[in-house]
Image (cartoon, rainbow, N blue to C red):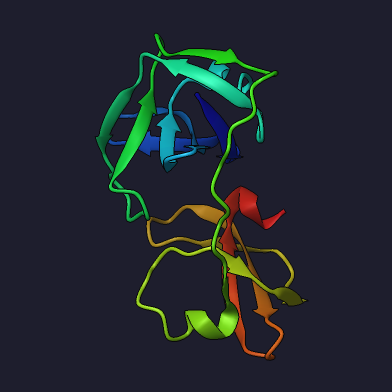
Amino acid sequence: MSRCALITGMRQFKKEGNKSGFYFNFEVENSSGSIRGVCYEKDTWNQLEQETSYEIRNFVVRKSKKQSKHDFELLFHKSTEIKECPDMTIDVPKKKFKFVGDILSSDSNIIDVIGIIGCVSEEKQVQTKKGTETLRREITIRDHNLSSMNLILWGEQTS
């Protein structure tokens, strides 16, 4: 039994040999912690809702392919079964956030942040190293001590 804590928007991928498709990322959590996941099934995206509890069966656990706070990730496929459990509440541990000033001295690459949005740039169309066009937006956040840092949002995350 897990609660869906995060669902990204649907993203498109293209591989050599004209292979293309869609995927989304998600994060589920329970009383023992959280784990990231990826799904290449468009229909599954419509089945999940943030902050909702699910019983999930028939998935693959694999080593994480991306730099992540998780060593492993879940892979949903066509035979993955997702059953909503509306009456179940899951005791999830509180997240430990860091303030902006604490991040500047941190060695960690992936962290949760609490701050105040100070400035938001206009959304810009930019060209990636691979030659594709994508959207980019820069946000400045600061904390109660007025320490600040810039965050860059890409693609669908800019809106």
Residue 102, how many percent across, how many down?
51, 82
- Image position of 51 (left or right of 152): right
Percent across and percent down for residue 120 are 74, 73
Residue in the image at 36% along x and 28% along y: 75
The percent position of residue 29, horizontal first and vertical second, equals 50, 38
Q: Foreground: 144 or 124? A: 144
Whether residue 44 sits left or right of residue 140 in the image: it is: left
Left-right relation of 54 to 117? left
Residue 120 seen by the camera = no
- Position above or below: 41 against 17: above
Return the residue nearer the eye: 97 or 133.
97
Note whether 127 is above or below 115 in the view shown.
above
Residue located at (58% from left, 68% from top): 113
Instruction: Examine the rendering and report whether any part of residue 51 can be seen.
Output: yes
**Residue 55: where, in percent of width, then height?**
51, 17
Which residue appears farthest toward the bottom when viewing the image?
146
Which is more toward the observer, 41 or 6? 6
Q: Is residue 139 above or below residue 3?
A: below
